[in-house]
Amino acid sequence: MALETQSAEQSAAPSRNQSSRAKIAVPGNRGVKVVRSCTVRKPAAELYQFWRSLENLTSVIKHPVSITRLSDTESHWKATAPGKTFVEWDAVIINDHPNELIAWRSKEGAEIPNAGTVRFEAAPGDEGTEVTVQLEYDAPGGRFAALIAKLTGEEPEQQVAEALRRFKALMEAGEIPSVEGQSAGGPQRELRRKERQQMQRKAAS
Amino acid sequence: MKANCWMGKREMQVQEVDDPIIINPGDAIVRITSTAICGSDLHLYDGYVPTMVKGDIMGHEFMGEIVEVGPNVKRLRVGDRVVVPFTISCGGCAHCGRQQWSLCDNSNPKGWIAEKLMGYTPAGIYGYSHMTGGYAGGQAQYARVPFADHGPLVVENDLPDEKLLFLSDIFPTGYMAAENCAIEPGRSTVAVWGCGPVGQFAIRSAFLMGAPKVFAIDNVPERLAMAEAAGAIPIQDGDDVLETLRELTGGRGPDAAIDAVGMEAHGSTYDDVKQTLKLETDRGYVLRQAMRAVRKGGVLSIPGVYGGFVDKIPIGAIMNKAVTIKTGQTHMQRYMRHLLSLIEDGKIDPSFVITHRVPLSKAPEMYETFVEKRDGCIKVVLDPAA
């Protein structure tokens, strides 16, 4: 399956008009779209800066996806589990309207074609910026969804929602809330201890 | 350290657990000098709040001394004496910005649980189920305090803990409940259902705000006596409360009604049966009575904790009498400083509510005493060092 992308001119005129939303369609409408929004109390420019380096997303995607920078517009995505790499692909930014929109897609030949956009729009009054992420991938039950589910036990929709929740916290509060590694009694004690050791190893490395 | 852990319905255990560590850069660690059991902890004890996990450390009312701070903490220093608010707030979201601290967007790491039930998640709360974050609580010798620059109140006086501890929840909670009644000094009458600790503070707060008459409704004699000592008019639940309130207010009804009971109201067999069969999660006896008893155009203020669903709500009474409902977990940081100054000025001494002072190790048996309202139990303070 190949993903087709409308040209930058067609897809992302710098306006808030709904019809101008970026479209990155899977041909014949066979793809699945996940759309999720949140409002962040920060200026669009600051949020755009974070997303413009897609590798920053590594810090907000909870489950083990690592993204490394290849060039100004290209990045390498790798979904891993301890000791094993499940799938990797290269992504390229194909649409870039500073402070308004970024669109990317996997490069030709990717094992699991996928694409995403993030849009930044001023929220009413002093609410901040509405951030809308759209993720697109192959059909339900397809490999992308299956992979995400296998790695995380969650559907891609939940993954996007959680990534956005964590992104918002990081931008607004400067950190992502967590109870991993906290004190606990009874049957939770060992799990929390393991989390704590993992955190300490990570901090040391 | 020692901590009081939830180990199942009506089962608490003081266990030896790992000391807390700094997890996020905005965290602080508090050595707890005093902590308390809250009436709302009884909802967890009785198993009515879902998403509790065996081993969860209980407690959301605590104070102590800062012993460690994370690298991003700027306002607090090691050695500061602090009272910790029970809700956790990030300080950076739109709700925190509007002083709606208990609605913080970012402090609940497990927000999706509450979103399923309520649409959107409230703030994280210490020791209050995984629906509000699963944070380890303060019935312990130490606690981790996240977003530490935006929560704890630094105390610089040398007043004893027992005068300050209740700034962590029940005094601000009772105060906000009264403030929500929009009391007009010298005119507004207020009826308070539930004379537990929050009800007691709501009664005293209503008087501080100038209410000429406050009615106190309960079925426990020593609680009614404590309310009466503050100047409230006691009403025994089980009498015809609506009728009594009508006669005591010249036929108008109280201008404001406060439900300081919440989800485990006693008095309705219907609710007991439905809650037992899990056909409703919360018992709505008080809520229904308050809705009918409140004056036309009045306010219903709900500080009592509800978790899920109540049925047979007389929405017709609310609609046709144009009643305003005000509720929410307490926006702690909005009140703590002002209420501290009331304590420092001697306008109120919150320690009046304490009936039991025991070592932390006695926490499990005190839950039982408290839930059964034995031995005149109204408020239990635990000493983590003893």
Image (cartoon, rainbow, N blue to C red):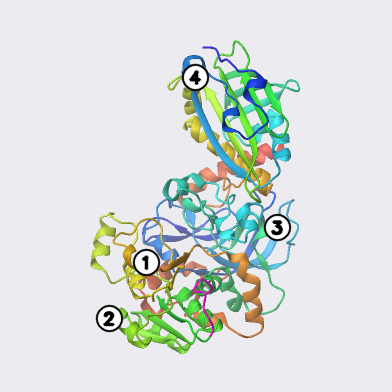
Report if residue A185 is visible in the image.
no
Q: Report whether mark 2 lies on the same chain as mark 3.
A: yes
Q: Which residue sits at x=62%, y=31%?
A: A118
| Residue highlighted by disc 3 | B68
Gap in angstroms between the C-alphas marked 2 and 1: 20 Å
Q: Which of B321 and B129 is in front in this view?
A: B321
Q: Specify few, some or many for label 3: CA neighbours under 10 Å numbering under 14, 14-19, or 20 or more.
A: some
Label located before the other in sequence (2 or 3)? 3
The image quarter containing residue B262 is: bottom left
Q: Quadrant of the C terminus of chain B?
A: bottom right
| Residue highlighted by disc 4 | A138
Find numbered disc 1 in the image and state the secondary structure of the residue it sits on: helix
- What chain is tagged by disc 3? B
Residue segment shown in magenta? B179-185
Gap in angstroms between the C-alphas marked 3 and 1: 50 Å
Q: Report whether mark 2 lies on the same chain as mark 4.
A: no
Q: Which of B326 and A18 is in front in this view?
A: A18
Gap in angstroms between the C-alphas marked 4 and 1: 50 Å
| Residue highlighted by disc 2 | B240
Q: Report whether mark 3 lies on the same chain as mark 1.
A: yes
Indicate the amino acid at tag 3: Glu
Residue B318, disc:
1
